[in-house]
Image (cartoon, rainbow, N blue to C red):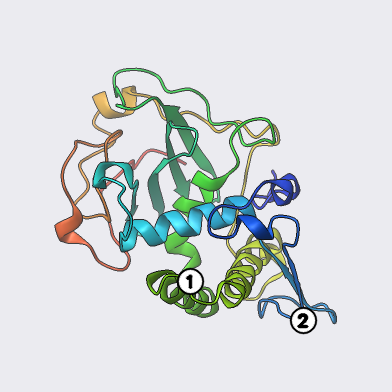
Amino acid sequence: MANNIVATWGFKRKLPEPFEDYTDHAIFDDIASKYCTQPRKKSTLHAATLRAVLAYLELENPVGSTPPEKLGAVGTQSNNFVVAEYPSKTGDLQVVVYNQLNGKFYGGCYTPPPDVESTPEKYEFKDSKQSGAALLFALMPVFLADEECNEKYQELKAHRDNGYPDLDAAAETAAVLCDNIYRRTRYASGLPTGGVKIDLPANGVLSLIKPLNIQKGSMHQPKCSMETFRCYVQEVDLRKHRQPFPEMILLGNLS
């Protein structure tokens, strides 16, 4: 079992726009999440976390020119499972399912347009492979249930919607948001509240979700979501059913 979803090697990766110039100056002193109990406070921008947060912002309220079918999708089922389709910057569509009860992930990588009859490539969470942004993207509804995380997320959204007039202030907000997510996952077992259980395989390779799951009827069309799912569910435009914490019928046999 591993819980380092905010991987140490991820701090060495180039930060996404508009924060790319902070890549070599990603540490902010004297600010931190409320979950930081150390006397010396500091927060660090983390590339995969930022990619997940920015992708979720764009999914929730698109301001760019990305077509809707390339924004990704996130949905939940009965507070047990979260499913996400994350359009990676590498060009593939990364599909992830997170089990909130035991902290485990399932997933795979498709080449768009996805063919649900084919077996996806493995999702390998490691420095030389996938960054973990898709996993963090899937966790966004869980992260945002925390008051501080949601507050900083809303602040970052305001910075983005206004065109980032004060990039330093936006970066500080993003750093605290990254710190919140890091500490709630890395130290979840020691937190009285707010912890997010993570159980990643030691080798970083997620268990695949196979097309057989669809053919056997163990995955069903979502009843609502933030976007259009293209892989493990029948394609349907679900944007008309948006709500803060979407629910979907999914997977019942994963554990």
User: Can the viewer see residue 39 in this picture?
Assistant: yes
| Above or below, comparing residue 235 to residue 198 in the picture | above
Q: Position of residue 58 (x, y in %)?
A: 36, 58
Look at mark 1 in the image and give the residue it sits on: 164
Mark 1 or mark 2, which is nearer to you?
Answer: 1
Q: Position of residue 57 (x, y in %)?
A: 40, 62
Kindly check if marks 1 and 2 are in contact, taking CB atoms under 8 A apart as contact.
no
Residue 37 in the figure: left or right of residue 88: right
Q: Judge by depth and name the residue closer to the eye, 38 or 213.
A: 38
- For the N terminus, which image quadrant? top right
Q: Judge by depth and name the residue closer to the eye, 233 or 92.
A: 92
Residue 122 in the figure: left or right of residue 77: right
Mark 1 crowdedness (10 Å alpha carbons): few <14, some 14-19, many ≥20? some
Mark 1, secondary structure of its residue: loop
Mark 2, secondary structure of its residue: loop
Number of numbered markers: 2
- Give the residue type that dot 2 points to: Asp
Q: Tell me the residue at 65%/48% (across/down).
A: 14
Real-space Cα separation, disc 1 to disc 2, in angstroms:
22 Å
Residue 30: assigned label: 2
User: Can the viewer see residue 101 in this picture?
Assistant: no
Q: Tell me the residue at 47%/41% (across/down).
A: 255
The answer to which of marks 1 and 2 sits earlier in the sequence is 2
Q: Judge by depth and name the residue closer to the eye, 251 or 243.
A: 243
Q: Position of residue 164 (x, y in %)?
A: 48, 71
